[in-house]
Structure formats: C-alpha cells, structure tokens
C-alpha cells in the first residue's frame, strides 16, 4: 500500500510504500529517499484522487519501518547537532566572508550528508565554504538556497492568530498572494499589518479570496 509522507526539515512530500504493514495518519516512520534514510510522518493513503493533486517531481520510494525508540533517540541527538552545527557554520561564514544568511542545518538521519539552508541576494559562490565545511564535518555537504518564505518555514514561529504558522505546519508550498487580494478584502494596506514573518504578503489572504471574488460577482450581477 502507498502513503503520502512528509519528511525532512522542509516538510517535503513523497509517496512511499510498504508491502506488509498498514499505517495511519501521524505514524512516524523511517523512509528511503535520494538523500538517504529520513524521518517521516504519514499523512494519508496515496489514493488516485490524492495522487492527481500532487505536482510532478515528488519522491517515490518505500517505508523502511516504523520509528523505534532507538530511532527517536538518534533523531533527537541529530536535532541537537543541527543547532550546534548551525552555530559553528555561522562562525565559519564570518571567517571566510561569504555573503549569505544561514537559516537552518539538517543532518540526514543515516549520516550520509548535512544540508545547509540559506538565503541570499542573487547567486552565491560558496565553493570555498563547502571545502571548509567538508573538512570540518567529514561528510557530504549540500548547500541549498531558499526563498524568504521557505526560510520562515524552517523556523518555529507563531502567527498573529496565535497558532503555528501555516507554512510551518500543513502548507507544502506557499500559495500565490497578491496585493489585489488585500484590496478586494478591504484590509489595511499597511505593510506591517499584511506582511508575514517572511516579509511577504500573508498566506492567509489567499484562503478567503475565492469567497470575495464570488461575492463581488454576485453583487455585480
């Protein structure tokens, strides 16, 4: 049976199968991905209807096992190493004067690589940085440039509603949000009011947009 699984720091979506065991929503599992073995969370069964809604390019592989107590202990150890490596890498960036902002470090579960997520203006030549990091951590280094919206997704944040930011929770990809949506909903156009932690327009402006469009159409008719 196949399942939709969130995995990795970026909460990537993939379709993973297991021949002998059934899983339910929220099951914590170890999955095989192109990056190695990773911790994932089962979201739902990969029905034809759900599969039709997925964008192309998703990972498709297998569920290796349900997370064990030993797996959870190792996962927590790696999370601690993420923050330690983040601090160390920030010092290295200052030492070699690379113009980028490091957001998050992710140790892949089986130790095959470390992923460094960063934001920057334009393209960055980080070849010297990779050489230093490879020597420092003695493993494969992957540098991944992300957008401001993605950067917030990697950090634990609360929205104005008092709940976890949607991009940190259930949103796989941020929706397209425009200033026209804010104008249609007649909300204040003060940037400090309609901008999220990422500095871009709040994703929640998109949620009720279709209702406002429909209401506008009904009124004009």
Image: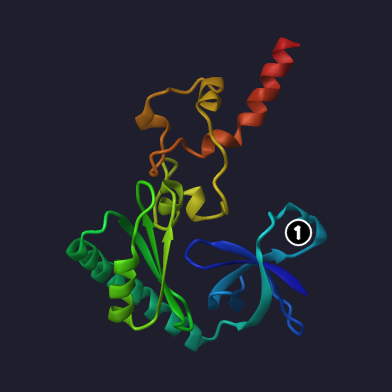
Q: Is residue 199 above or below residue 37?
A: above
Q: Residue 197, percent across and down?
A: 38, 44
Up/down of 44 relative to 176, above or below: below
State whether residue 160 is above or below residue 188. Answer: below
Q: For residue 141, what is the image quadrant?
A: bottom left
The image quadrant that residue 135 belongs to is bottom left
Tally of numbered discs:
1
Q: Nearer the viewer, residue 121 or 118?
A: 121
Looking at the image, which residue sits at the far top? 220
Q: In this view, does 182 lie above or below 133?
A: above
With 199 as the anchor, is 28 left or right in this view?
A: right
The image's colour scheme reads rainbow
The image shows residue 42 at horizontal and vertical percentages of 64, 69
Residue furthest left as drawn? 95
Q: Residue 51, percent across and down?
A: 76, 59
Residue 134 figure quarter = bottom left
Give the residue at x 48% y 83%: 110
Q: Which residue is drawn at 42% across and 44% down?
A: 159
Image quarter hosting the C terminus: top right
Identified at 35% across, 31% down, the residue is: 192
Residue placed farthest to the bottom in the image?
70
Q: Mark 1 points at which residue?
A: 51
In this rendered view, identify the residue nearer to me: 19 or 57: 57
Residue at the image point whose x is 68% and y is 78% from the top:
62
Residue 166 at x, y percent in the picture:
51, 49
Q: Looking at the figure, which quarter contains the N terminus?
A: bottom right
Is disc 1 surrounded by few (<14), some (14 to 19) or many (20+) residues within 10 Å?
A: some
Q: Is mark 1 on a helix, strand or loop?
A: helix
């Amino acid at each position: 049976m196949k399942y939709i699984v969130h995995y990795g720091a970026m909460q990537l979506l993939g379709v993973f199968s297991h021949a002998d065991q059934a899983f339910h929503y929220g099951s914590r599992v170890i999955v095989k991905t192109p990056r190695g073995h990773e911790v994932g969370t089962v979201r739902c069964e990969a029905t034809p209807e759900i599969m039709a809604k997925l964008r192309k390019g998703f990972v498709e592989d297998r569920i290796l096992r349900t997370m064990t107590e030993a797996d959870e202990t190792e996962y927590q150890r790696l999370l601690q190493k993420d923050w330690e490596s983040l601090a160390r890498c920030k010092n290295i960036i200052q030492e070699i004067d690379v113009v980028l902002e490091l957001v998050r470090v992710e140790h892949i579960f089986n130790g095959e690589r470390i992923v460094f997520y960063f934001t920057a203006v334009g393209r960055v030549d980080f070849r010297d940085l990779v050489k230093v990091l490879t020597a420092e951590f003695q493993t494969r280094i992957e540098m991944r440039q992300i957008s401001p919206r993605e950067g917030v997704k990697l950090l634990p944040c609360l929205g104005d509603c008092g709940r976890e930011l949607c991009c940190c929770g259930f949103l796989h990809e941020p929706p397209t949000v425009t200033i026209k949506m804010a104008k249609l909903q007649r909300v204040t156009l003060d940037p400090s009011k309609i901008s999220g932690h990422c500095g871009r327009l709040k994703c929640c402006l998109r949620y009720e947009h279709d209702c406002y469009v429909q209401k506008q159409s009904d009124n004009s008719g």
